Amino acid sequence: MNVNNFLQSEATQFVGTAAANTIGLVIGTIHEDIKALLQIPDEYQAISIVSSRTGTVAQAIAIDDAVKAVNAKLLRFEMAIDAGKQCGQGCLFVLGTENISDARRLVEIALKQIDYWAACIYINEVGHMESHVTPRAGEILHEIFGTPLGKAFGVIGAAPAGIGIVAVDQAMKAAPVDIVWYGSPSHNLTMMNEFSAGISGDVSAVQKALEAGKQVGCELLRVCGITPISITKVHEVCGPDYVKENYTPTSCLKTDNTSDER
Amino acid sequence: MNVNNFLQSEATQFVGTAAANTIGLVIGTIHEDIKALLQIPDEYQAISIVSSRTGTVAQAIAIDDAVKAVNAKLLRFEMAIDAGKQCGQGCLFVLGTENISDARRLVEIALKQIDYWAACIYINEVGHMESHVTPRAGEILHEIFGTPLGKAFGVIGAAPAGIGIVAVDQAMKAAPVDIVWYGSPSHNLTMMNEFSAGISGDVSAVQKALEAGKQVGCELLRVCGITPISITKVHEVCGPDYVKENYTPTSCLKTDNTSDER
Amino acid sequence: MNVNNFLQSEATQFVGTAAANTIGLVIGTIHEDIKALLQIPDEYQAISIVSSRTGTVAQAIAIDDAVKAVNAKLLRFEMAIDAGKQCGQGCLFVLGTENISDARRLVEIALKQIDYWAACIYINEVGHMESHVTPRAGEILHEIFGTPLGKAFGVIGAAPAGIGIVAVDQAMKAAPVDIVWYGSPSHNLTMMNEFSAGISGDVSAVQKALEAGKQVGCELLRVCGITPISITKVHEVCGPDYVKENYTPTSCLKTDNTSDER
């Protein structure tokens, strides 16, 4: 078998890849035993799979967008411990659709949107800072974060967790918004070294809050390391050598993060 | 104390190392307080320890083989979150035996078998794919995976998890076999970004199923990165520079996984 | 906003960084909604935050020291899965104080002490070994590890977990001490590949026990890799190139850990 055959087979299809080491797949007719194992209801003939090594929020918002365009049901959402140096986690989304063309279209939209939303994840060698605002939360975001349907929704978070607390505190002080969800290592975040909050409110208030939080979070990361860079721009801005030098576990060992040697 | 003294001491013995950063140890007479803490029954005078940074299945099958040759009882089996870039996890096995010579022989066989089974773990910079078939499951595999004693047993799994689902689906469609166990990030796998299944059946059917699943899993990994390589052959095939270049967290940052630059 | 403004603002203050990628922060008046979310009692006007990427024990002892000097209450203690290649975990401490000057002084002392205690964490490319003894356990150590107040307390642990078991066993055999706490991947350690024990007793007995355990643990790490080095001395002793070569995920892939090539 080669990838071209695989692409063309009716039963299982590779759809594409996206930022954050994401792969998108569809299965036309899943094997009955696996259907039973994963408790997939009978009405879903086809399934969409979005699987990433890094991050969860950008993917959730992207899939929320896709489900506004294609009728589908979220069957499994799992966070995984992953992402190496920048803390954070990976994720697995499995969605059910009526037929394989819907399944495929859903994944295509989701992958495109993941490339878009991933640009809001900033990293340096010590941690990361992400903030995302969607003007109208759909069913997926409602289901995962409990945020009100149809209202603006944002997520702000940073790693290590202490920076996240300060960023969320600043966000809440900057505009009249509500926290509808939060994650800390022992709460909602599969023990990752991150603190984040899901925020609901008027779109301009959510934007103002997240902008304030992001500014503080990026400042604090900068005190510990290099100026945070969008994960979609690291190669372009810095070149592979720079990346290799700055994003290895080596930096774990630095005692004095503010010395001249960097 | 030096290692030679340590090797020769009656009470505690270093047995050896094996693939996947595995260390094998024995303790002739474990301290009473630790025995109580770990709830080790009185009849076990000596304990065998096999502790790895990477993988669990190869180790489980290896120890299953060893227990067919040496009388021993599995006292602790723990999976740990580990293995860095290639997802997956580490593991800790503690077994009780009647005396230290049995404990030592058990570990010697297990280490040798781990070197053998680890060859079936394929990795690239995005994830891994492993498949193992043993013609006859013994007590250890029965205890850990619930597979029928004496029947053929295989495990197939891949990371990131989405690739694992497709690989298991293809395996089930290729031959008449039964799923007796499965792992996803939130089920049985300590939140690792992997999907895997334990499969029972006639040995030829299990082999056929796993071969089909492995082929698809490796194809999908190849779409995201380099052609997967057995972990026991990476140095030999590619040389240390190649490894260094391809197996660092740097690759986390790649936006376009299908570009020409690789 | 820049860091200087941020440093001078009354409400939120960056205090400093320390070993093990630690950042220390204070919030003068935390937002009411976050206070409710994190269940912070009303009497604490200000909070201190200590957040690290690597390790937990050195930080716990450092904060225990700080709380002897400044009146404060531990509000949150969370371990996170982190630390990359050397196993281990990150941590988040949130403490409440009456006012911001106490909060700041607490963090200043804690950061200084973390630099001190982190010197007792030894690592190589396969794992780590740490042992710490404090002559008199205060409230923080009592609360986290259940160790008797005012008595000497030590923690000894190693990764991978199998090495930790042998080290703790040797420690217990070397002096008359009590185990008051233990951690294995599935017990108290958020699934990290480590085994460690909290030990109480007379200070000289605890020291003797930990010295014996540390010696064995370091010997066993050395069998699998380079001679373990204190994390605060890695750069100084070896230079950045050495570190880069030895502390990358590459070493995960080594089949033969005892070969001449290293």
Image (cartoon, coloured by chain):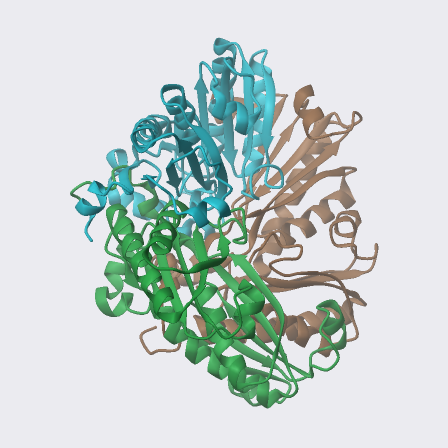
Chain colours: A cyan, B green, C brown
Q: Is residue A176 above or below residue A197?
A: above
Q: Is residue C110 left or right of residue C145?
A: left
Q: Is residue B190 left or right of residue C71?
A: left
Q: Nearer the viewer, residue A155 or A168?
A: A155
Q: Nearer the viewer, residue B205 or C186?
A: B205
| Among the 4 quarters of the image, the one containing residue A225 | top left
Taking the view exactly as shown, the residue that stands out farthest to the left is B260
Q: Can the viewer see residue A126 in this picture?
A: no
Q: Position of residue C208 (x, y in %)?
A: 71, 73
| Among the 4 quarters of the image, the one containing residue A176 | top right
Q: Nearer the viewer, residue A5 or C239?
A: A5
Q: Is residue B119 above or below residue A240?
A: below
Q: Position of residue A157 (x, y in %)?
A: 51, 30
What is the total number of numbered labels drawn onto the structure image? 0
Q: Is residue B236 above or below residue A179?
A: below
Residue under the point 34% across and 72% down: C262
Residue under the point 58% across and 24% down: A146
Q: Is residue A248 left or right of residue C59?
A: left
